[in-house]
Image (cartoon, grey):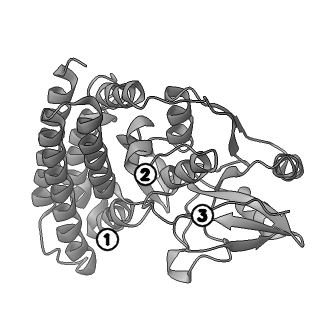
């Protein structure tokens, strides 16, 4: 069984790409920046109590599944999202939904994903892709990273749906059940902007949003003293990996959100959103500067090329830029 699924590799971020592919199947004309913006995918959190590859987690995106669910909710699209304790039940339910002619989004770990290039494989459990058929005990996959049709055997697919470690997907799957006859993108875009402003400015926890960026700057500044250069370099390397390689990376999310603001400016007839989109690009470039300088430190662990104070100052500048951006966005009366 194979659905007539037109996979377009037009995305940089796996979940917004999966969302676009799923919605386009139902003739919803949406692109990645619009899905990422409506789905309020922009986020920041520094979680020292959660470890990924033995290093604290720094997240630059909303939790897995939220971009899809928020996009659907804001656009009035009905959907199902499920997880399963039992792997066999997860596989049986996937087969059942596919048999109804419905493509399914899934969250997986990439370390054992057979079609991933070796250099992309890591213990990362938040990758999203779309399943659009099953033939000869193989699942047909549309993946934002790999062009064309990919295939995974039943046993391999069960394994990647149940990896161990942080953010284990536990067989997570999601799919569309009903789409309105007409969709007006204006209110969903406004809801997405307001949600991101709230999460970046108003959540009362010091590890989240703009406050979280400043908290990360403080922790980063102390790493060489509290952990030593070797561990500090390991922590820094994991942060840069999150910024530049995992998903589309933290700086990349800033550029995608800027593209969304550009589109929203035309959609809502608000030219100031285009000015803010430029500022968002400048913030993204500042994160890229941090990655470039930090990567040099990781290559010279014993004698870092740049001080961690220098790197922490860049992060503090990023926090100031993003605070100004979201305060300006929050003041706009839609």
Residue 127 marker: none
Q: In which quarter of the view is residue 127 placed?
A: bottom right
Q: Quadrant of the C terminus?
A: top left
- Look at discs 1 and 3 and give the one toward the viewer: 3
Q: For the residues marked 1 and 3, what is the alpha-carbon distance in whole angstroms?
A: 43 Å
* Whether label 1 touches label 3, CB < 8 Å: no
Q: Is residue 310 left or right of residue 217?
A: left
Residues packed near mark 2 inside 10 Å, few (<14), some (14 to 19) or many (20 plus): many
Residues packed near mark 3 inside 10 Å, few (<14), some (14 to 19) or many (20 plus): many
Please, what secondary structure does the residue beneath circle 1 have?
A: helix
The residue that mark 2 highlights is 32
The residue closer to the viewer here, 129 or 54, is 129
Q: In which quarter of the view is residue 286 placed?
A: bottom left
Q: Earlier in the sequence, mark 2 or mark 1?
A: 2
- Where's residue 222, x and y in %? 21, 52
- Where's residue 75, x and y in %? 51, 29
The residue that mark 1 highlights is 230
């Amino acid at each position: 069984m194979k659905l007539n699924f037109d996979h377009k590799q037009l995305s940089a971020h796996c979940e917004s790409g999966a969302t676009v592919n799923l919605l386009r199947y139902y003739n919803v004309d949406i692109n990645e920046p619009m899905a990422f913006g409506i789905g309020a995918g922009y986020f920041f959190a520094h979680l020292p109590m959660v470890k990924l590859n033995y290093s604290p987690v720094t997240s630059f995106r909303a939790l897995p599944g939220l971009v899809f669910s928020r996009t659907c909710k804001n656009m009035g699209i009905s959907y199902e999202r499920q997880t399963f304790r039992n792997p066999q039940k997860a596989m049986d339910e996937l087969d059942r939904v596919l048999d109804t002619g419905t493509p399914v989004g899934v969250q997986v770990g990439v370390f054992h994903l057979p079609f991933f290039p070796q250099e992309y494989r890591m213990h990362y459990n938040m990758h999203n892709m779309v399943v659009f058929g099953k033939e000869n005990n193989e699942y047909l996959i549309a993946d934002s990273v790999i062009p064309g049709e990919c295939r995974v055997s039943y046993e391999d697919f069960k394994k990647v749906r149940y990896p161990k470690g942080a953010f284990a997907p536990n067989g997570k799957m999601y799919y569309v059940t009903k789409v309105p006859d007409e969709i007006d993108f204006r209110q969903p875009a406004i809801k997405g902007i307001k949600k991101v402003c709230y999460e970046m400015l108003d959540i009362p926890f010091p590890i989240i949003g703009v406050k979280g960026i400043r908290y990360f700057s403080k922790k980063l500044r102390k790493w060489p003293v509290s952990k030593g250069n070797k561990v500090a370099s390991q922590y820094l390397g994991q942060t840069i990996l999150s910024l530049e390689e995992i998903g589309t990376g933290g700086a990349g999310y800033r550029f995608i959100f800027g593209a969304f603001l550009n589109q929203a400016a035309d959609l809502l007839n608000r030219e100031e959103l285009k000015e803010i989109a430029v500022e968002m690009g400048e913030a993204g470039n500042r994160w890229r500067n941090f990655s470039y300088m930090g990567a040099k430190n990781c290559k010279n662990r014993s004698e870092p090329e740049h001080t961690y104070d220098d790197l922490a100052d860049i992060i503090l500048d990023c926090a100031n830029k993003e605070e100004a951006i979201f305060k300006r966005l929050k003041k706009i009366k839609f």
